[in-house]
Amino acid sequence: MALGALPDYPWDLMAPYRERAEEHPDGVVDLSIGSPVDPTPDVVRHALAEATDAHAYPATIGTPALRRAIVDWFARRRGVTGLDEASVLPTIGSKELVALLPFMLGVGEGDVVVHPRAAYPTYEIGAVLAGATAFASDDPAEWSEATRLVWLNSPGNPDGRVLDVAELRAARDRARELGAVIVGDECYAELGWDAPWHDEPVPSLLDPRVTDGDPAGTLAIYSLSKQSNMAGYRAAFVAGDRALIARLTNVRKHAGLMLPGPLQAAMVAALGDDAHVAEQRERYRARRDVLKPALEAAGFRIDRSEAGLYLWATEGRDAWESIARLADLGIVAGPGHFYGVHHPQHVRLSLTATDERVRAAADRLAGSAAA
């Protein structure tokens, strides 16, 4: 089946609102796309510099050191035991994997790809690229017999929703009943805010309490972009069912999809150092503590957002009206329309701005509330 027309890139629609925001006398506060602004940790940069003699082709499967670092990280940070080097695979960021996974798994015409109702748009694009049908649903009872791939996203983008062990287990049980592969996109798992996730790890789809130690048909994706400020490194990985990992590895070998060797070394350093992750988490927590009450005082209600990198907010009117209001304050956010048809009155605001810019946004919101 030939690739059909793709939708226009949604963020292009933000151009006039961004231009309006940039006219603010104190400058723009960009809280739209969640691109990290804080420095990449020295431990990562030093590892990269020391690995620049990369004269040979890198291994698609990753170096033994990287595969071992991923396995150890899952056990230490995510409570996932039972993985080995054949259960993990590095990828060139997580977005390319999300977009290509349906195709690589053989999903196609007549098949259904399930994704959350409030969803990162690439889940749907991946279905389109494979010629499959995307279906937005958070209720496993709604998933049809044609379902071949299920995406979960916890903590969610854009809404910060966390799925607990019981919810993850129910989704996985339904996927297995249907013979579908189920994948947990867990890229924000280190950023838990509200109880119980402020001091309890966000559970993984690969958690033994979910899988009973059997990862068949189950994968989890993670990225170092947010926890380690490595978005520019395109450093991510997938883990789980060995047979699925072997299939993905074979496809990626044929396609030449391999992470550069120096970046693999940088990933090893990042995965082995928890101190910088804790430091970055506290940066985001402090920014959230400034921005959330300012939005609420300005008339926004914050929904979900118990974890992750964003605040999912509404003032009870169409998101484009809220985007315009924020633009007049010099603040750029993302409209809920970009994340499916189910949340047309929400906007997404990222915590990825400097402390000074977040404080500026809070001050402007306070001024608008008093006006």
Image (cartoon, grey):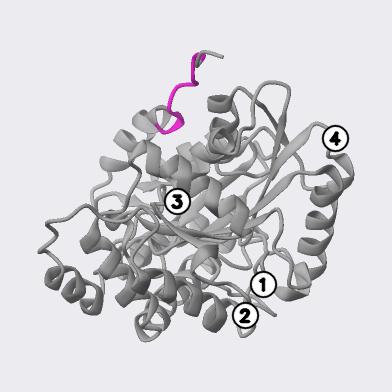
Q: Earlier in the sequence, mark 1 or mark 2?
A: 2
Q: Residue at x 45, y 71 (%)?
A: 70
Which residue was labeled with disc 1? 203
Q: Earlier in the sequence, mark 1 or mark 4?
A: 4
Residue count near mark 4 (Cα–Cα under 10 Å), binned few <14, some 14–19, many ≥20:
some
Which label is found at residue 144? 4
- Mark 1–mark 4 Cα distance, whole angstroms, equals 26 Å
Q: Is residue 328 left or right of residue 263?
A: right
- Mark 3–mark 2 Cα distance, whole angstroms, equals 21 Å
Q: Earlier in the sequence, mark 4 or mark 3?
A: 3
- Mark 1–mark 3 Cα distance, whole angstroms, equals 19 Å
Disc 3 marks a residue whose amino acid type is Ser
Instruction: Identify the image quadrant of residue 96.
Output: top left
- Helix or strand or loop: what does disc 1 sit on? loop
Which residue was labeled with disc 3? 94
Q: Is residue 43 left or right of residue 163?
A: left
Which residue was labeled with disc 2? 79
Asked whether the residues under the numbered discs 1 and 2 touch, taking CB atoms below 8 Å apart as contact, a structural biologist would say yes
Magenta stretch: give its range: 4-11
- Helix or strand or loop: what does disc 4 sit on? loop
- Mark 4–mark 2 Cα distance, whole angstroms, equals 31 Å
- Helix or strand or loop: what does disc 3 sit on? loop
Decide whether residue 8 is among the magenta residues. yes
Q: Is residue 108 above or below residue 263?
A: above
